[in-house]
Amino acid sequence: MKLEKGVLLSGMVKSAEGGFPLPGCGVTVMNSPTGRRTVYADETGRYSYRTLPGHVVLFIESHLGPPDFVLPWRSTMPPGQIDLDNDVLDFDLLVPGVMKEVPLRVVVRDAKGQPARGAFVQTSIPEVRYKPRTGFTDAAGCIVFEGAGEGMAVLLYAWTPERDQAASTRVTMTPGLPEVVLQLAPASRVTFAVKNPDRTPASNLDMLLFLPAGPEEESRLWLLPAYYRTDAQGRIEVPGLLPGIECIPMWEDHANFSHPLTENGRPIVIPAGANPTVELVVESATEGQGRRRASPPMMLTPKPQSLIGKSLPDLKPFGLDTPKDGKPILLCFWSQEQRPSRQCMNDLLALSQSPQGTQLTILTIQAEPVERETLSKWTDKLTVGMIEKDAEKVRASWGVQSLPWLVLAASDGTVLAEGFQLAEWQEILKAKSEK
């Protein structure tokens, strides 16, 4: 085997407009001998990667942006194409359109103005470091999203589990934005009657529904569930649509290319009434040509079932052993890319080093697959497992509705509480012991 001398490629990652460094920003490197690899800038904004000589392409994808900042919708920095012919090459990357991240607090209320617990909320926030763009409201009817950028227009859509009521609004993100309140109203169950160009029923057709969130095509909100399949008569009922809202219906071919069901992909307006019918026609389109769809957001599933009163599920898939020390178990699902999760991990670390923490077995689970070395900050001090695959299904099976998510189990493994604040764990144990 012939060994070739490697090339050290390095440089700074900076904002194109402000010139400030972007620590933690992911840089994707494509090189024909070594394939595709993503490296992350250090705390000073500097990245480095050793590769083989040859032609290399560098680019930055929006979902790999730096912590506390957001990149434009599905943007990629114009790639830097380099021929590596030196032992060391310094190449700075200037990232355009960097926005300061702004948290978005949403409160959903029912028709009587009371908190709507368990309402499902979707947002048009772009995919940013695996942060949730959808979720269920808590007991106060509240949910907080991260990943929106300052000045970004965000579309919100919420509905009840029965999808008989819904609410929607569009907001522009600002640093001082107060909570956004969504007031639920009666929603329609719309029947879409889809026909082929010859006006025969378009049966077994996969239909997608988008809500326009902004002028950019990529900023659409993909209404969940992701697909609706027509029956033998070319009809499909879609509940939870608000009368008067704009909607873009599309169909998808077998090559995962989507095509509009209206002329030039223009939106339609959902008619008034409890059960209106909308007729659509499949225009001729070439299979495998059109707009390739992006990955859908988290699939809408029934609200996760509670684990309270049940035995703690098996921990082995996370690389963890079931504790046998006779202590209550405090389990935390978290994401290293999320500020509230990182704060919760800091609090758990402090708890583990306190006298009260000796009363517990503390376990943590990284809620989506990441490179294990990125967890080294925590693995030396806490017991850390990880969801290796099918993250959304696994989180749903554990009843996880948001991150961080705490689960408290008795020493025998019976789940006592879930979705609570860390400061409440002692009160929960005390209340259970007094029963």
Image (cartoon, grey):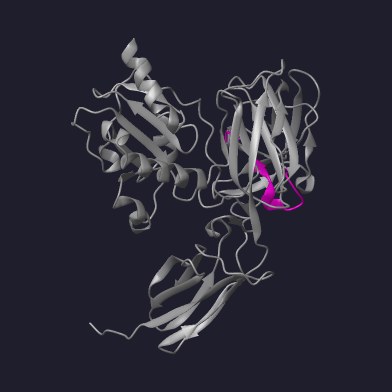
Closest to the observer, 331 or 70: 331
Q: Is residue 56 left or right of residue 168?
A: left
| Residue that lies at the very extreme toward the front in this rendered image | 355
Quadrant including the N terminus: bottom left
Total numbered circles: 0
Q: Is residue 213 magenta?
A: yes
The quadrant holding residue 386 is: top left
Q: Nearer the viewer, residue 205 or 362?
A: 362
Residue extending furthest toward the bottom: 86
Find the magenta span and give its range.
212-225
**At 31% from the left edge and 43% from the top edge, which residue is drawn?**
353
Q: Residue at x 54, y 48 (%)?
A: 295
Is 416 drawn above or below residue 177 in the view shown?
A: above
416, above or below 358, in the image: above
x and y percentages locating residue 241 in the rendered image: 70, 27
Residue 279: give x, y in percent of width and height.
75, 30
Q: In the depicted view, which residue is nearer to us: 80 or 415?
A: 415
Q: Main secondary structure of the magenta part?
A: loop
- Rendered location of residue 2, percent (x, y): 25, 85
**Residue at the (30%, 26%) spot, across then down:** 312
In the image: residue 298, left or right of residue 408: right
Q: Residue at x 43, y 90 (%)?
A: 86
Residue furthest to the top: 435
- Does residue 315 show up? yes
304, above or below 336, in the image: above
- Residue 406 in magenta stretch: no
